[in-house]
């Protein structure tokens, strides 16, 4: 980090790597695993068989019951069939994938039952691969690569009701791959009999390998690991930008409040949208092509049908009820009291409109981001999310941390502060499938611990009674050791109970997204140092590598 910086836009001078690791070739099914069509055994050609196995592997998944998934799959599968197969296989409902499905289930069971030696062998092979392909040389430094393996072919799932679910993600070949390295580096060699699509020497970008996937036509990249200098610095700059916003946020807030009264409709809409982005941490919401993706929206693309206005609701005035699908088809549902001016403006924006009309019809993300850029250099809607997330964590930690609590209780306070942020950012998850079971296990541990504690307390009581009678040093010693045993069990019980509370509260909230992407890690590092909480209780090994810069930089007095 302390080395000289290159001129603006130049990311590196030397870059050398081994290229990507391709997905293993398809292994045909054993002879005894049969596919049936209309009740009759049918031998599929290798290409058609491979695509059929993708469907068979997902047979127990609800995806394969969805009409759109089945339709897209069947259309793409037919493209891989021979003419003869196409003539016979005309109806997906007549296809029987049961034997294939059972074969893959048995395989996955066998993997679980592997011996220690077999597991170790696989681990060693993976480590060998990592050693060879998992590192690159960038400007005299050996840096770790994040994802050097290319995704295997399969069926596209998408999030929510994605119109393209079930389509075939085709196998990526060397001929699809663009390699990026420096002119003086050794160019990685493609697999025998193949050649790269292109070799580039572009030092204004940080990716090493790229290709275009066939479903959305989006470009995929192989990049450096988050612990690398280039990623760490970018991360640090992101939080520094959010800290700059802290200095001028009051001015911006006063400005948009003034704009609620503007004579121009465009300015009013922009000001109300900005208020939502600031107060509710909504995403900006880009325009999207219809039919290409699931119908999800952000702030600028909200439609009239996504909000309901209540002059009064549950004893509060001027309540806006939001209900829409945000990024990744995660539902955003919230009832928020707003200021009277905002409420009146929303009524105005909704006048004479149909449910499917845009709420902010004079606004798009381009207009909004240009305005934000004028307010502060580098300001975007995302900076507001980062700023509000980080400032919320800092405030919550101050409020929730009690100096005299023990470490498990302090960690619970930290997780509660993190939860407040996840709720603000609407980071949800489905309750884990194993949730009930793991809660029951934890509860039985708690019950067992309570019994142990009751026994220990009885022992202590009788030891005290003995000591009263005997009055000698030996019985006194016994009392002391019994006391310690009770204390130890009380601490263990408390730790388990805190864990149970934590898990219950965390049932439907995803903490990881905000922890990795929206919270300035220096706030956490400072909190750990201040209260003597070991950093590994909050950040796991990967996270500690990613945030090494913050662990090094922040002391206990750090203020966001």
Image: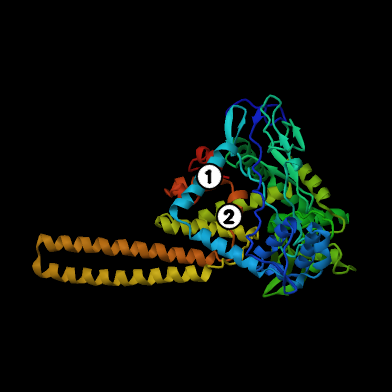
Mark closer to the observer (2, 1) = 1
The residue located at (58%, 45%) in the rendering is: 560
Image side of residue 2 versus residue 308, left or right: left
**Of residues 22 and 315, which is closer to you in this image?**
22
Is residue 261 among what the camera can see? no
Q: Position of residue 128 (x, y in %)?
A: 53, 40
**Of residues 8 and 520, which is closer to you in this image?**
8
For the N terminus, give its image quadrant: top right
Looking at the rendered structure, the number of numbered marks drawn on it comes to 2
Give me the C-alpha separation between circle 2 and circle 1: 30 Å
Per the rendering, the mark at residue 110 is none
Q: Position of residue 312 (x, y in %)?
A: 73, 74
Per the rendering, the mark at residue 125 is 1
Is residue 502 among what the camera can see? yes
The residue located at (51%, 71%) in the rendering is: 436
Per the rendering, the mark at residue 512 is 2
Circle 1 sits in a helix, a strand or a loop, which is it?
helix
Q: Position of residue 92 (x, y in %)?
A: 77, 69
Q: Would you place residue 136 above or below residue 272 in this image?
A: above
Q: Would you place residue 10 above or below residue 144 in this image?
A: above
Q: Quadrant of residue 529?
A: top left
Q: Would you place residue 270 above or below residue 239 in this image?
A: below
Of mark 2 and mark 1, the one earlier in the sequence is 1
Colour setup of the view: rainbow
**Of residues 127 and 228, which is closer to you in this image?**
127
Circle 2 sits in a helix, a strand or a loop, which is it?
helix
């Amino acid at each position: 980090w302390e080395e000289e910086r290159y001129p603006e836009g130049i990311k590196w001078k030397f870059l050398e790597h081994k290229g990507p690791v391709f997905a293993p070739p398809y292994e045909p099914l054993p002879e005894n695993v049969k596919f049936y069509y209309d009740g009759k055994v049918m031998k599929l050609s290798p290409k058609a068989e491979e695509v059929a196995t993708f469907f068979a592997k997902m047979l127990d998944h609800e995806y394969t019951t969805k009409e759109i998934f089945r339709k897209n799959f069947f259309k793409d599968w037919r493209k891989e069939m021979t003419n003869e197969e196409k003539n016979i296989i005309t109806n997906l409902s007549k296809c029987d994938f049961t034997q294939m499905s059972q074969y893959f289930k048995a395989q996955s069971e066998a993997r679980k039952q592997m011996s220690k030696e077999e597991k170790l062998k696989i681990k060693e092979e993976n480590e060998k691969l990592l050693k060879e392909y998992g590192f690159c040389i960038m400007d005299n430094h050996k840096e770790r690569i994040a994802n050097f393996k290319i995704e295997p072919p399969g069926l596209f799932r998408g999030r929510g009701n994605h119109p393209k679910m079930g389509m075939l993600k085709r196998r990526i070949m060397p001929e699809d791959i663009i390699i990026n390295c420096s002119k003086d580096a050794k160019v990685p060699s493609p697999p025998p009999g193949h050649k790269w699509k292109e070799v580039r020497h572009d030092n204004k970008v940080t990716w090493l390998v790229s290709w275009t996937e066939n479903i959305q036509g989006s470009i995929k990249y192989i990049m450096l690991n988050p612990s690398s200098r280039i990623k760490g610095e970018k991360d640090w700059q992101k939080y520094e930008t959010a800290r700059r916003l802290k200095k001028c946020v009051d001015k911006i807030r006063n400005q948009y409040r003034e704009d609620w009264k503007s004579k121009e409709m465009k300015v009013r809409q922009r000001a109300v949208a900005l208020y939502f982005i600031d107060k509710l941490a909504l995403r900006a919401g880009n325009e999207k092509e219809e039919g290409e993706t699931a119908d999800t929206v952000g702030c600028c693309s909200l439609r009239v049908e996504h909000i309901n206005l209540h002059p009064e609701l549950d004893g509060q005035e001027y309540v806006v009820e939001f209900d829409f699908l945000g990024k990744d088809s995660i539902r955003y549902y919230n009832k928020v009291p707003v200021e009277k001016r905002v409420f009146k403006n929303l009524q105005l924006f909704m006048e004479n409109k149909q449910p499917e009309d845009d709420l902010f019809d004079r606004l798009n993300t381009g207009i909004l981001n240009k305005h934000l850029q004028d307010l502060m250099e580098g300001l975007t809607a995302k900076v507001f999310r980062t700023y509000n997330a980080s400032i919320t964590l800092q405030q919550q930690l101050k409020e929730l941390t009690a100096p005299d609590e023990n470490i498990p209780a302090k960690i619970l306070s930290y997780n509660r502060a993190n939860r407040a942020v996840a709720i603000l950012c609407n980071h949800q998850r489905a309750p884990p499938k194993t949730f009930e079971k793991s809660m029951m296990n934890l509860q039985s541990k708690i019950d067992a611990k309570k019994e142990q504690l009751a026994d220990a307390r009885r022992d202590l009581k009788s030891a005290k009674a003995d000591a009263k009678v005997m009055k000698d040093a030996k019985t006194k010693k016994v009392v002391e050791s019994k006391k310690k045993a009770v204390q130890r069990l009380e601490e263990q019980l408390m730790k388990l109970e805190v864990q149970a509370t934590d898990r219950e509260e965390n049932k439907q909230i995803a903490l990881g997204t905000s922890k990795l992407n929206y919270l300035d890690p220096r706030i956490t590092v400072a909190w750990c140092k201040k209260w003597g909480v070991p950093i590994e209780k909050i950040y796991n090994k990967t996270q500690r590598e990613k945030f090494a810069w913050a662990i090094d930089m922040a002391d206990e007095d750090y203020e966001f």
